[in-house]
Amino acid sequence: MRKSILLTVLLTLSVSAFALRPQRREVVMDTVCNASIETMLKVAERFCYQFQACPDSLFKWAYVGLGQVKESEEAANTKESKNAIQLKYKDRVYDPQQKTGDVAIDIYVLGVRWWKDQHLGSKYRLQRPADQAYPLTAHMTATYSGSILDGGDFILRMEPISATQTRVHYEFRLSFGRVLSVFISDNTWHNAIEWRLETIFRNIVECAETGSVKPKK
């Protein structure tokens, strides 16, 4: 009953507001990592492999700090909550030759399971220019079953500055389906999703620089 009420409310939002809301969102960041490009690439590929094959392993390092965030009861029950959208990982299938993955997930909105057994497919490839050694680009694309998400891209472009420093460009793009787009307001994006994608990048860089990721306070 609660799920039906929430869905009805969201679907009856203003059509004009929906038309103005972008379906594609992204986080773009640049930094200099104090690690060699070999180390940076190794960590990037570790992230992509675990994302495809064993996503629970990412909570030990790349997802540190992304768990449930303590909020007031009032804040936790709104679309702007940091925990408004949660994913629960289930079955996993990975093809090491093709570097493709398929992960079944349940999607929860405001604590209610809205979608069950959605499938997140992914494909990883390492790209490099035809006529030069760098930059190297670790690129993972994702597709989703149903109409919740149209797809996504994880991109890390790396270029050595010296033997111990690497220039890193990061992009994490998500294209939301029409139903979920209604729910993703600017505040929902900033509070529930964007900060997590930014944290993932910082954790990847920290792991490359230090070999581990410290718990967040």
Image: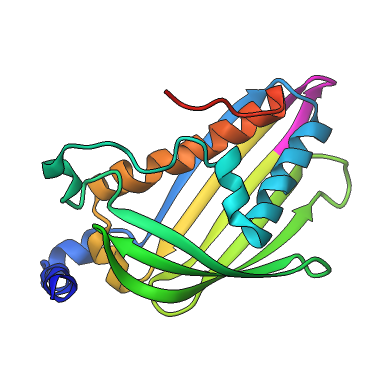
Q: Quadrant of residue 51?
A: bottom right
Residue at 83% over, 34% down: 38
Work out whether residue 198 or residue 129 is closer to the camera in this orientation and state it: 198
Establish if 195 lies above or below 205: below
Work out whether residue 153 or residue 105 is closer to the camera in this orientation and state it: 105
Residue 195 drawn at (x, y percent): 39, 38
Residue 174 painted magenta: no
Q: Is residue 6 visible?
A: yes
| Residue lying furthest bottom | 146
Answer left or right for 50 relative to 115. right
Residue 47 drawn at (x, y percent): 66, 47
Establish if 213 lies above or below 200: above
Residue 130 drawn at (x, y percent): 86, 52
The colour scheme of the drawn protein is rainbow
Answer left or right for 191 relative to 87. left
Residue 160 painted magenta: yes
Answer left or right for 108 relative to 200. left
Q: Is residue 62 visible?
A: no
Work out whether residue 188 or residue 62 is closer to the camera in this orientation and state it: 62
Answer left or right for 102 relative to 195. right
Q: Quadrant of the N terminus?
A: bottom left
Q: What residue span does the magenta drawing correspond to?
A: 158-166
Residue at 37% over, 65% down: 107
Instruction: Give the tally of numbered discs.
Output: 0
Establish if 60 lies above or below 49: above
Residue 110 drawn at (x, y percent): 24, 57
Residue at 10% over, 67% down: 14
Main SS, magenta residues: strand
Residue at 69% over, 22% down: 210
Q: Quadrant of the C terminus?
A: top left
